[in-house]
Image (cartoon, grey):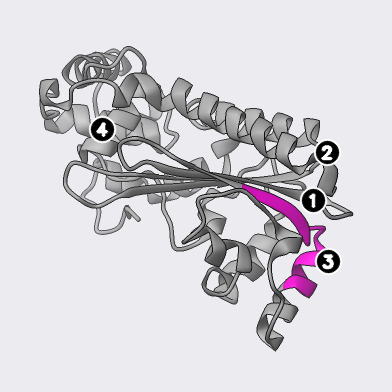
């Protein structure tokens, strides 16, 4: 996870407090918010309150890019991270090997720690749900999990629901990453230092004005550097440029992962 420590005066690193403030308002992040809104709307249409959207993309340098979006309740996110439930969460464990959709009530409940996990999850309405993995042709892996229902997923509707969820996840991936991953990465030219800095700060949620203040340049100059970054990356929009730069390793991942709380957006219920 990138840090803003050890800053020199006037550099982007000197704006640590501004970065912390920006992370608290990431629901306004123009790049990610549409994903969150669409996933929430789909979950609600299927009768669920919560979602987790996970994505793993191979990178040219060999280290995979991983992202997690969720609207889980903040208190549950804190508990999940503090107890390192990622290590024993039956859903997370199954997803490491499963290529097929599954309902959570299908998972075995064995051992006191797993029982405690589900008991705590139940207090937040997270006992029942289902997960649909998606695997792409270039090593991309994604999963969409829906939860927040008071009852197990009905047996008679599971196949149809799995199919709808898989279709939604595929459409989301195609719209966001399709134009990017379909391009020849050999045409990409490395970003210049200021182009990389401007695009990296845009990805973290900074405004054009804030980037200008951080880099001690005029906002129009910031926009110029961003246009040049798009051209070098062969991207049409800033969103495509961010994703392309993340995949190629031109900029570091925005804020991942070790903790789900880093991707807990303000759309989650308080």
Distance of label 4 from label 1 (alpha carbons) = 35 Å
Judging by the rendered image, the residue that carries numbered circle 3 is: 123
Q: Is 4 left, or right, of 124 in this rendering?
A: left
Residue 118 in picture, x, y percent from top left: 74, 71
Instruction: For marks 1 and 3, give the one nearer the viewer.
Output: 1
* Magenta-span inclusion, residue 119: yes
Residue 260 in picture, x, y percent from top left: 54, 58
Q: Nearer the viewer, residue 195 or 162?
A: 162
Mark 4, residues whose alpha carbon is within 10 Å: few (<14), some, or many (≥20)? many
Judging by the rendered image, the residue that carries numbered circle 4 is: 245
Specify which label sits upstream in the sequence, 1 or 3.
Answer: 3
| Callout 4–callout 2 Cβ contact below 8 Å | no
Instruction: For marks 4 and 1, give the one nearer the viewer.
Output: 1
Per the image, label 1 sits on a secondary structure element best described as strand
Specify which label sits upstream in the sequence, 4 or 2.
Answer: 2
For the point 14% across and 24% down, the residue is 188
Q: Is 38 left, or right, of 201 in this rendering?
A: right
> Outermost residue toward the bottom?
112
Q: Nearer the viewer, residue 15 or 203?
A: 203
Residue 122 in picture, x, y percent from top left: 81, 66
Specify which label sits upstream in the sequence, 4 or 1.
Answer: 1
* Displayed quadrant of residue 104: bottom right
Judging by the rendered image, the residue that carries numbered circle 1 is: 148
* Magenta-span inclusion, residue 121: yes
């Amino acid at each position: 996870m990138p840090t803003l420590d050890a800053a020199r005066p006037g550099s982007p690193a000197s704006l640590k407090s501004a970065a912390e403030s920006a992370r608290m308002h990431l629901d306004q992040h123009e790049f990610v918010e549409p994903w969150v809104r669409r996933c929430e709307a789909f979950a609600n249409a299927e009768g669920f309150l919560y979602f987790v959207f996970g994505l793993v993309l191979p990178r040219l340098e060999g280290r995979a890019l991983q992202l997690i979006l969720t609207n889980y309740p903040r208190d549950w996110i804190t508990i999940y991270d503090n107890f390192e439930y990622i290590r024993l969460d039956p859903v997370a464990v199954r997803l490491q090997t499963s290529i097929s959709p599954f309902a959570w009530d299908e998972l075995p409940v064995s051992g006191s720690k797993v029982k405690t996990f589900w008991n705590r999850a139940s207090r937040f309405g997270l006992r029942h749900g289902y997960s649909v993995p998606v695997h792409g042709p270039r090593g991309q892996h994604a999963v969409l999990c829906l939860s927040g229902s008071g009852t197990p997923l009905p047996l008679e509707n599971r196949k149809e629901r799995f199919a709808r969820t898989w279709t939604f996840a595929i459409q989301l991936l195609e719209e966001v990453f399709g134009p990017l991953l379909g391009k020849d990465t050999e045409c990409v030219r490395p970003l210049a230092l200021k182009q990389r800095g401007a695009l990296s700060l845009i990805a973290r949620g900074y405004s054009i004005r804030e980037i200008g203040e951080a880099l001690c340049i005029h906002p129009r100059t910031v926009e110029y550097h961003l246009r040049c970054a798009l051209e070098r990356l062969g991207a049409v929009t800033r969103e495509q440029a961010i994703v392309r730069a993340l995949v190629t390793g031109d900029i570091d991942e925005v804020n991942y992962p070790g903790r789900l709380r880093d991707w807990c957006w303000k759309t989650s219920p308080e």
